[in-house]
Amino acid sequence: MDIYVGNLAYATDDEGLRAAFAAYGEVTSAHVVTDRMTNRSKGFGFVEMPNAEEANAAIAALNGAELDGRPLRVNESQPHPREERPRRPFDGGRGGYGERPRRPYGDRPRGPRGGFGGGRGGPRRGGYGRRDYDDAPPESQW
């Protein structure tokens, strides 16, 4: 039987949790849940005991009992309910276009200089050594 143990002190580790439950029977596993980033205890853990009678005796005895200065909250572990999310319809692998058909590449709107996309007209900017040779000064000024 899987047992939830809450309100653990941050100093309680796996071995301390195992020792508290071992007094009531065989303990298969004892695990204190820790934060991945800080490696600090989150204040709860799980104990697994194979014999249901021993597990129920441990739950009855340890619920409200103190361990490392904190009163424990002990009960049978409940499965975490999975949240059902609405399924999104499959779009055929078209990258989020849904039911809308994609336009072919040649039908896309062109910018003012003939390229794809927006932008304003005017001289080109950027690039390495790129010039608008129509606007270049005469060679005598170079």
Image (cartoon, grey):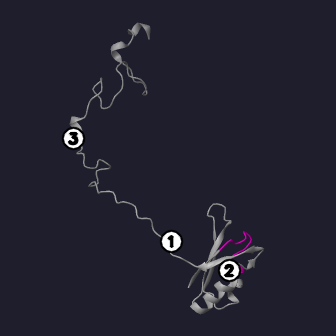
Quadrant placement of the C terminus: top left
Q: Quadrant of residue 132?
A: top left
Quadrant placement of the N terminus: bottom right
Q: Residue at x 34, y 20 (%)?
A: 121
**Residue 107: image location, x then y, percent:** 21, 35
- Bounds of the magenta span? 6-17
Under mark 2, the amino acid is Asn
Left or right of residue 113: residue 65: right
Q: Quadrant of residue 113?
A: top left
Using the numbered discs, state the Cα–Cα distance from disc 3 to disc 1 in whole angstroms: 47 Å
**Residue 32: image location, x then y, percent:** 65, 74
Q: Earlier in the sequence, mark 1 or mark 2?
A: 2
**Which element type, helix, strand or loop, lies under badge 1?**
loop
Q: Which residue is mark 2?
A: 63
Left or right of residue 127: residue 45: right
Res 80 label: 1
Q: Is residue 15 above or below residue 114?
A: below
Using the numbered discs, state the Cα–Cα distance from disc 2 to disc 3 in whole angstroms: 67 Å
Q: Residue at x 68, y 71 (%)?
A: 7
Q: Residue at x 61, y 88 (%)?
A: 56
Using the numbered discs, state the Cα–Cα distance from disc 1 to disc 2 in whole angstroms: 21 Å
Under mark 1, the amino acid is His
Crowding at dot 2, Cα within 10 Å, few <14 / some 14-19 / many 20+, comes out as some
Res 104 label: 3
